Amino acid sequence: KAVDDFIVLGNEKEAKTLSENRAQESKDGKNPLTFATQDSAFSDKSTKELNLIIKSDVHGSSEAIKIAINQIQHEEVKPKIILADIGMVTETDVTLAKASNAVLIAFNVKPSKEAKKMAEKENIKISSYNIIYEVLDFIKQRMSGLLAPDVKETIIGTAKILEIFKVSGAGKVAGSKVTEGEITSISEVRIVRDGAIIYTGKVGTLFREKNQVKQVSSGQECGITVKDYMDFQKDDTIEAFNVTST
């Protein structure tokens, strides 16, 4: 139809999730994007609500997540999206999460430095994901009060890509300068571009003056390869991080 939405998703799995949910909506005659009115929000006093704030990288992801969330069924808890928007997590999002006691979810985006500092100060957890079904599993666990052990992520180093060059046998290498902390040859890393997470993987090789090294510290320039990824761009950020269960 001329008025139908046309949505481009990141992969086949997301497209399948969106397609299945829309088929179910059509069957049930429901509109999952109809949010609670003042009357409907208080029509069932026994139903608790789990407030959600979701920031996504693109409209297609946001749409698919909203549709999937509104299909979640629970006897005692109802998911309520109070904000679903595009772009990095901001201080405003953190403030809203605190004021509304909401779960703050970042899908394929990063918090700004200011938002990250505020979240740490206000003890607001920003839950980051890049796969839709993991977002849904997390929300279901929160609704059921059955969370798995809390997973804490620690940024151990960041580097800015200054140029891209080719090395025989290694492919494309990101000529970078480590701006904070350190990056090691076994680090988990993500590529961040304009606040959005482009890729998450592992360091392939670290170079210092054409020699392979195990570690590069703040202030040093180096060459970095990332396993199964070569689409670097100048000014991308490479973040090295550790994940631990608490």
Image (cartoon, rainbow, N blue to C red):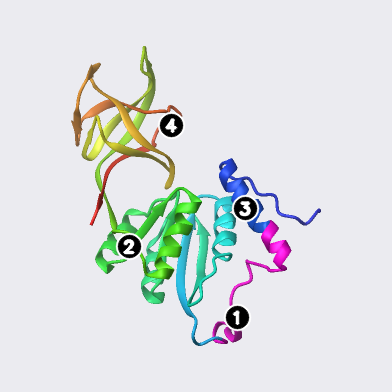
Marks 4,3: beta carbons within 8 A = no
Q: Earlier in the sequence, mark 4 or mark 3?
A: 3
Q: What label sits on residue 18 in the rendered view?
A: 3
Residue found 63% across the figure and 45% down from its top: 8
Q: Which one is closest to the eye, mark 2 or mark 3?
A: 3
Q: Earlier in the sequence, mark 2 or mark 1?
A: 1
Residue found 51% across the figure and 69% down from its top: 81
Task: Using residue 244 as the reference point, say whether residue 23 is left or right of it.
Answer: right
Q: Which residues are magenta?
A: 23-43
Measured along the vertical axis of the image, is residue 177 above or below residue 45?
above
Residue that numbered label 1 is attached to? 37
Q: Earlier in the sequence, mark 1 or mark 3?
A: 3
As measured in the structure, the alpha-carbon distance from the residue carrying label 1 to the one carrying label 3 is: 25 Å
Is residue 25 one of those drawn in magenta?
yes
Q: Position of residue 135 (x, y in %)?
A: 46, 56
Q: What label sits on residue 125 in the rendered view?
A: 2
